[in-house]
Amino acid sequence: MLQVRRNGQLKPAIRLSRNLSRPRYSGLEAMLGISHQMHPTGLFAVLAVTAFTPAFCQQPLGFPSWLKSFPGAAVAVRTSESSIESSYAASAQPPEVVEYYRRLLETTGLAFHPNDDGIGASIRAEAPECDLLIQIRSRADGTLVNVYCSAKSATSPSSSPDDIKVISVQPRAQRIGTAGVKPAGPPPPVRRMSAEDWMQMHQQKVAEMGLHREHPDAPAPPLVWPPWLVNVSGAAARPERSPDQAKNVHLRARYTSTVPMTKIYHFYQDLLKSHEYQTRSSMSTGQTMSGVKQNALGYVEGSNYPDGAPGARTEIKVSFSRDVLNGPIEVIMYFSTHEYIAKRGY
């Protein structure tokens, strides 16, 4: 019995256990290594540190040590919080690069499953370090390779309560026990695609999609002014032959108009688009000394490929400008034709 003094008198306090000198600790305290001599504040400190200590420490993301780039390539690497990417150009052709990664993955024990996406090969693999995506693209001087290493998504641990049982279900034919019906055997082995098989399939898909199609040389269309290319008022243009700065001959027509510049701008935009020209246009304002602003100059230009792009083409450019406020607008129209040379690509 423990007694305390209250108001000058000894009075009974709380009855304590005889084992007061050896307090009992829970399993948590034993796991934390807390002795019976530890001060109470020490227990709170240990619990506080334990409560705020992360359950795991995320390792920095990096490529697997066995994942080497194609020999002789200069590699550029970019990193982010959840992925790391490398890219390089190889002088070898795509089948050689695909075969290189096939040997690399199979030597490491990873499955090799190339996929033709129409513009090249994509190879996916699940390495212990990260999820891999290898993209192989054909170029005129070799092969472009991009390798992505993405962090694996975190998964929660699965739980299996005691009251849940897993029941295996047999095929229906085996449950019924039909006489004379043999159980299905194992599926036939899947034939592994070689680099040559993949390249043949890739070339077939590229041909079906019309990619990388060779375009022959084509002469320039006739240099004849189109009759629909008229003045903003509808009047026919009067073109003249004239050389440009590169001494290429083109046709040019000019006239003066007093209609608003915005009307001229939209008129030629609509006119070129209606005749299947891919247009580019711009219009800018000017300002007088007194601060008055007004549209001062602009242009509308476009290209047309009669036999499809790339190929021979015709070009039209219409420029318009004024020199003084509310002054007349000078409009100049140019028409030119251009040949196509396959070797240079235009």
Image (cartoon, helix red, strand yellow):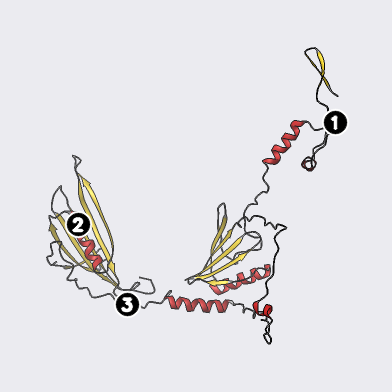
Asked if residue 5 is positioned above or below residue 198 in the image, the reply reads above
Amino acid carrying label 2: it is Phe
Question: Which residue position holds label 1?
Answer: 17
| Side (left or right) of 94 relative to 283 | right
SS label for mark 2: strand
State if disc 1 and disc 2 touch (CB < 8 Å): no
Residue 30 seen: yes
For label 1, count other residues whose C-alpha is less than 10 Å away and answer few (under 14), some (14-19) or many (20+): few
Question: Which residue position holds label 2?
Answer: 320
Amino acid carrying label 1: it is Ser
Q: CA distance from mark 2 to mark 1?
A: 105 Å
Q: Residue at x 13, y 57 (%)?
A: 257
In this view, the residue in front, 284 or 248, is: 284
Q: CA distance from mark 1 to mark 3?
A: 107 Å
Amino acid carrying label 3: it is Ala
Residue 218 — which label? 3
Where in the figure is residue 260, as x and y percent of width and height?
16, 53
| Side (left or right) of 147 relative to 258 | right
In which quarter of the view is residue 319 placed? Answer: bottom left
In which quadrant of the rendered image does the C terminus lie?
A: bottom left
| Marks 1 and 3, the one that precedes in the sequence | 1
Residue 93 seen: no
For label 3, count other residues whose C-alpha is less than 10 Å away and answer few (under 14), some (14-19) or many (20+): some
Instruction: Count how many numbered circles sit on residues in the image.
Output: 3
| Marks 2 and 3, the one that precedes in the sequence | 3
Where in the figure is residue 199, as x and y percent of width and height?
53, 77
Select label 2 or label 3 by which is in front: 2
